[in-house]
Image: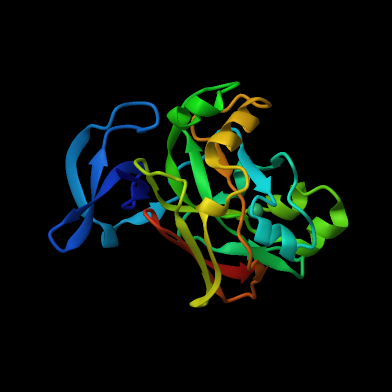
Amino acid sequence: MRIARYTTGEDPCYGVVEKDGGRLVVARIHGDPIYQPVTFTGERTPLEDVRLLAPVIPRSKVIGIGRNYADHAAEMGSTPPAEPMIFLKPNTAVIGPGDPVVMPPQSREVHYEGELAVIIGKVCKDVPRERALSVVFGYTCGNDVTARDLQRSDGQWSRAKGFDTFAPIGPWVETELDPSGLRLTTRRDGEVVQDGTTADLIHDVPTLIAYASAAFTLLPGDIILTGTPAGVGPVAAGQRVEVEIEGIGILSNPFVTR
Ligand code: MG
């Protein structure tokens, strides 16, 4: 299922994105599908008539993984770490599809990083790798926006990756997907700048869940950004970045200055 969070001008709600003849519609569901089974209200709205929102708002954390593709580690002039390299982005950085990424005046070098985002569906701790996919609610596209100059100068990555709007996710959560071999493409103003596959993840999704949950209790709605392939680069104000992942869809956000 493709589960969207959206508004038609009223309070945010959830729905399943479905084909209906030649168009896509959103079939509204009761409540929050992370916490209750999907049951339909009967209300159906053409997708083009709703505003999609971030498909999940993590109550606690966005977990980032650094240098998890060998070609990206190489372009950064480093080697991949033996174990997953974890950092955190605050949940206040999360925005939805179409929302503007606001580039802060503190940085002169804001980069896109297209990534597969894993949405956790259960409270869990110390999840064995073999059972890791059972705690996943679904997958969406993510952009681990990074102030590259501040990442270098700060030493710690919290500020460089944690500015408001630096974690776009969407357009919806795909709940039935094998995350192990998905093509991931990033476009900047239509030009393909990243073209990778999650088959090249150094530490795969089950490994990342096991590793992260050995450190932190994971809560429903927590997000793991799994790392970016080669081809990261700067964005100028007025440009648009699209992250497309096979089997999910396209996340598109304009970049602006404040
Ligand atoms: Mg990243």
Q: Nearer the viewer, residue 122 or 203?
A: 203
Q: In the image, 11: left or right of 252? A: left
Q: Nearer the viewer, residue 155 or 45?
A: 155
Q: In the image, 110: left or right of 16? A: right
Q: Where is residue 1 in the image (x, y as percent from the top left)?
A: 29, 43
Q: In the image, 153: left or right of 232? A: right
Total numbered labels placed on residues in the image = 0
**215 vs 53: above or below:** above
Q: Which of 11 and 166 is in front in this view?
A: 166
Q: Residue at x 45, y 45 (%)?
A: 179
Q: Residue at x 53, y 35 (%)?
A: 206
Q: Where is residue 76 in the image (x, y as percent from the top left)?
A: 76, 62
From where the camera sits, is residue 106 visible? Answer: no
From where the camera sits, is residue 136 visible? Answer: yes
Colour mode of the rendering: rainbow
Q: Position of residue 191 (x, y in %)?
A: 52, 78
Q: In which quarter of the image is the C terminus?
A: bottom right
**59 vs 228: above or below:** above
Q: In the image, 240: left or right of 25? A: right
The quadrant in which residue 34 appears is top left
The quadrant in which residue 72 appears is bottom right
Q: Where is residue 166 in the image (x, y as percent from the top left)?
A: 62, 55
Q: Which residue is drawn at 34% across and 52% down?
A: 9
